[in-house]
């Protein structure tokens, strides 16, 4: 096969049977991750698509403990956060108009950004619902089950309200279009199809392995885990336990997502993943062809760097 495009598409068809690929929408672009590589493709204001790609060796090669169930989910959450912040910084700089000053994050600034984002999420989705539930104790009584159920319902409600609120913002809607382009491209890859705009366009923008679904699962799993915490504990212990237990919740949620992705052909699994897919109607939008081109370019670059390696990780 002398034609480079033919050779590349043969590689794509081979990889489609071997590996899981995931991604993330960024500012005017898409990041795609294969098990051993990542690529970020961003469309500049000039129309040019710029790409950054890297090899990303699995941590499990250096630390075998990372392969353990539940542990791998907690590690995946942290590594995805690190990589996501870096990808957003790169895309924000590349999407700037000519003459605007770019700003690279130092390791210290990167750590600070992650700490702020993580802290905001903990306060909004875990501490605030707990505090509001504490205020409702005179109304809901002394039952530990009722307390934790109300806490969980408030947590999910805050999460849904947050997603709905940001989905109304114009800039975020463009990111959500790229989110839809990411999903469509992954579907086409998984189907073993040639990655063309025409092929990618006809696929769904709702994917069962989406990070949005993962976050919803986290919210629901937390209801079960937090129900084990005694209601009589003081507020500071309850709040602290939510932070300490978050890696466990992420790990369990990851295993559920991994299982459901492998069994989504059954009616039972399709039923239980339906809420996550429905939520993606808020976090994805139908992309245009130019956005699909960016997602396809990101996928092609990530696959080329990955080079045919096989790995059992699930990227979301």
Image (cartoon, helix red, strand yellow):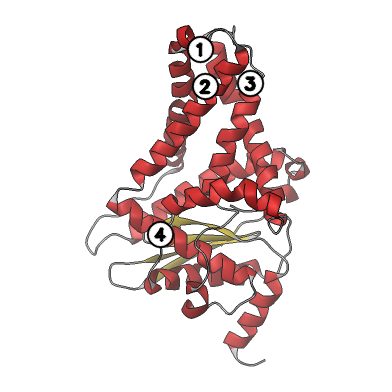
Q: Which residue is mark 1?
A: 140
State which quadrant residue 264 falls in: bottom right
The residue labelled by disc 3 is: 227
Q: Mark 1 or 3 closer to N-term?
A: 1
Instruction: Report which quarter residue 67 is drawn in.
Output: top right
Mark found first going from the N terminus, 4 or 2: 2
Q: Which mark is residue 150?
A: 2
Q: Nearer the viewer, residue 284 or 281?
A: 281
Residue at x-position 73% and y-position 56%: 312
User: Of label 4 and label 3, which has the lower sequence position?
Assistant: 3
Residues at circles 2 and 1 in contact by the CB criterion of under 8 Å: yes
* Neighbours of disc 1 within 10 Å: few (<14), some (14-19), many (20+): some
Q: Position of residue 52 (x, y in %)?
A: 47, 64
Q: Percent position (x, y) of residue 114? A: 46, 38
Q: Secondary structure at mark 2?
A: helix
**Residue at image mark 4:** 285
Q: Dot 4, crowdedness within 10 Å: few (<14), some or many (≥20)?
A: many
């Amino acid at each position: 096969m002398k034609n480079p495009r033919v050779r590349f598409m043969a590689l794509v068809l081979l990889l489609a049977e071997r590996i899981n690929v995931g991604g993330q929408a960024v500012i005017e672009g898409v990041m795609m991750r294969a098990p051993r590589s990542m690529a970020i493709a961003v469309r500049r204001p000039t129309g040019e698509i710029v790409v950054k790609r890297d090899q990303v060796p699995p941590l499990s090669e250096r630390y075998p403990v990372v392969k353990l169930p539940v542990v791998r989910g907690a590690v995946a959450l942290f590594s995805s956060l690190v990589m996501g912040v870096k990808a957003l910084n790169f895309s924000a700089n590349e999407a700037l108009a000519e003459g605007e000053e770019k700003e690279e994050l130092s390791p210290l600034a990167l750590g600070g950004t992650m700490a702020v984002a993580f802290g905001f999420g903990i306060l909004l989705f875990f501490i605030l619902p707990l505090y509001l539930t504490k205020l409702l104790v005179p109304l809901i009584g002394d039952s530990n089950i009722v307390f934790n159920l109300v806490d969980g319902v408030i947590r999910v409600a805050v999460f849904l309200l947050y997603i709905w609120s940001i989905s109304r913002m114009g800039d975020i809607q463009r990111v959500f279009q790229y989110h839809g382009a990411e999903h469509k491209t992954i579907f086409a890859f998984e189907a073993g199809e040639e990655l063309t705009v025409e092929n990618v366009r006809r696929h769904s923008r709702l994917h069962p392995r989406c990070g949005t679904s993962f976050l919803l699962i986290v919210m629901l799993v937390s209801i079960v885990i937090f129900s084990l915490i005694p209601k009589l504990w003081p507020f500071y212990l309850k709040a602290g336990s939510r932070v300490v237990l978050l890696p466990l919740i992420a790990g369990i949620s990851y295993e559920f997502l991994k299982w459901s992705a492998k069994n989504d052909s059954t009616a039972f699994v399709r039923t239980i993943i339906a809420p996550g897919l429905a939520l993606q109607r808020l976090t994805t939008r139908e992309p245009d062809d130019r956005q699909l081109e960016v997602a396809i370019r990101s996928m092609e670059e990530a696959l080329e760097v990955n080079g045919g390696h096989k790995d059992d990780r699930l990227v979301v």
